[in-house]
Image (spheres, helix red, strand yellow):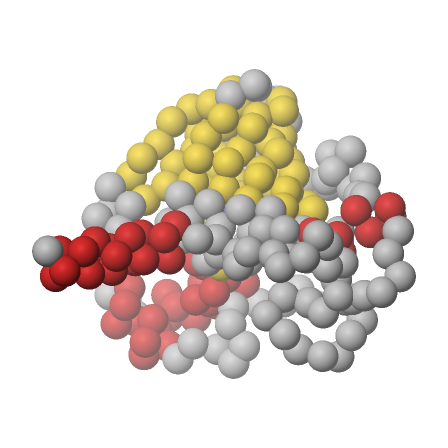
């Protein structure tokens, strides 16, 4: 029986750990001192706190979608709202021009839930078993992108589209696959990418040049 109890505790601990997002808070508030040079997991708390630390109006208006991909993400995370430090949640707004794409990416620290403000989107994520789970969603609808899985949103409509995205992390982090692999500094070696993508150096160099910083 003791053996079964021990296994149960272990299984519960593993489940509890794998379900956890940001670490839990140990006090009412810990407003981030973004200027502090002290490095901790998250940000150190500042002493003088006001309502502005918990306020942000940066999602009120659409972001400019004149980007290469035709989509723009405006974060409302701990870097913009210091009061979010240690609270384990954040938002973003994503705007899409007609045809705009939020390219395949992952958030290492959060599940994402999007709510469509305007327009319609084709969205999807890919499981670790390489299954694409995709759907078309429109104004008022919600879609979930599980933590860590590669996902995207594409506006195949003729009108602009926008979503509010919620995350169970104060700073979910984003790794956009193409940029991660082809625009890292220093550069990921060509011989890694040619082997990974089963193409020649020329093709790799071409993609890298597309992601090179504009001069
Ligand atoms: Mn995302």
Vertical placement of residue 111 versus 205, above or below: above
Quadrant in which the C terminus is drawn: bottom right
Q: Residue at x 36, y 53 (%)?
A: 16
Q: Position of residue 198 (x, y in %)?
A: 24, 65
Q: How many marks?
A: 0
Q: Position of residue 115 (x, y in %)?
A: 56, 28
On the rendered structure, is 211 left or right of 199?
A: right
Q: Position of residue 69 (x, y in %)?
A: 57, 45
Vertical placement of residue 52 versus 97, above or below: below
Identify the image quadrant of residue 205: bottom left
- Could you say which is closer to the camera, residue 84 or residue 148? 84
Residue 38 visible to the viewer: yes
Q: Position of residue 41 (x, y in %)?
A: 59, 70
Residue reaching furthest to the front: 1
On the rendered structure, is 161 left or right of 208?
A: right
On the rendered structure, is 117 left or right of 145?
A: right
- Could you say which is closer to the camera, residue 81 or residue 73? 81
Quadrant in which the N terminus is drawn: bottom left
Q: Residue at x 14, y 60 (%)?
A: 2
Q: Residue at x 54, y 63 (%)?
A: 211
Q: Residue at x 57, y 19 (%)?
A: 139
Vertical placement of residue 156 versus 214, above or below: above
On the rendered structure, is 78 left or right of 174?
A: right
Residue 158 visible to the viewer: no
- Could you say which is closer to the camera, residue 194 or residue 136? 136
């Amino acid at each position: 029986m003791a053996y079964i109890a021990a296994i149960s505790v272990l299984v519960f601990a593993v489940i509890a750990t794998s379900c956890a997002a940001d670490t839990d808070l140990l006090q009412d508030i810990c407003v981030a001192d973004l200027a502090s040079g002290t490095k901790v997991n998250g940000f150190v708390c500042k002493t003088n706190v006001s309502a502005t630390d918990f306020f942000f109006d940066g999602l009120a208006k659409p972001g400019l979608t004149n980007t290469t991909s035709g989509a723009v993400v405006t974060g409302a995370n701990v870097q913009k709202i210091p009061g979010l430090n240690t609270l384990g949640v954040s938002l973003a707004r994503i705007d899409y021009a007609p045809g705009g794409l939020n390219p395949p990416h992952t958030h290492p620290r959060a599940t994402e839930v999007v709510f469509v403000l305007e327009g319609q989107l084709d969205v999807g994520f890919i499981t670790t078993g390489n299954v694409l789970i995709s759907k078309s969603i429109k104004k008022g609808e919600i879609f979930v992108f599980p933590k860590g899985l590669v996902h995207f949103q594409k506006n195949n409509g003729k009108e602009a589209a926008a979503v509010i995205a919620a995350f169970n992390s104060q700073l979910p982090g984003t790794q956009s696959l193409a940029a991660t692999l082809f625009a890292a500094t220093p550069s990921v070696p060509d011989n890694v990418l040619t082997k990974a993508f089963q193409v020649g150096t020329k093709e790799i160099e071409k993609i890298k040049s597309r992601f090179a910083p504009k001069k």
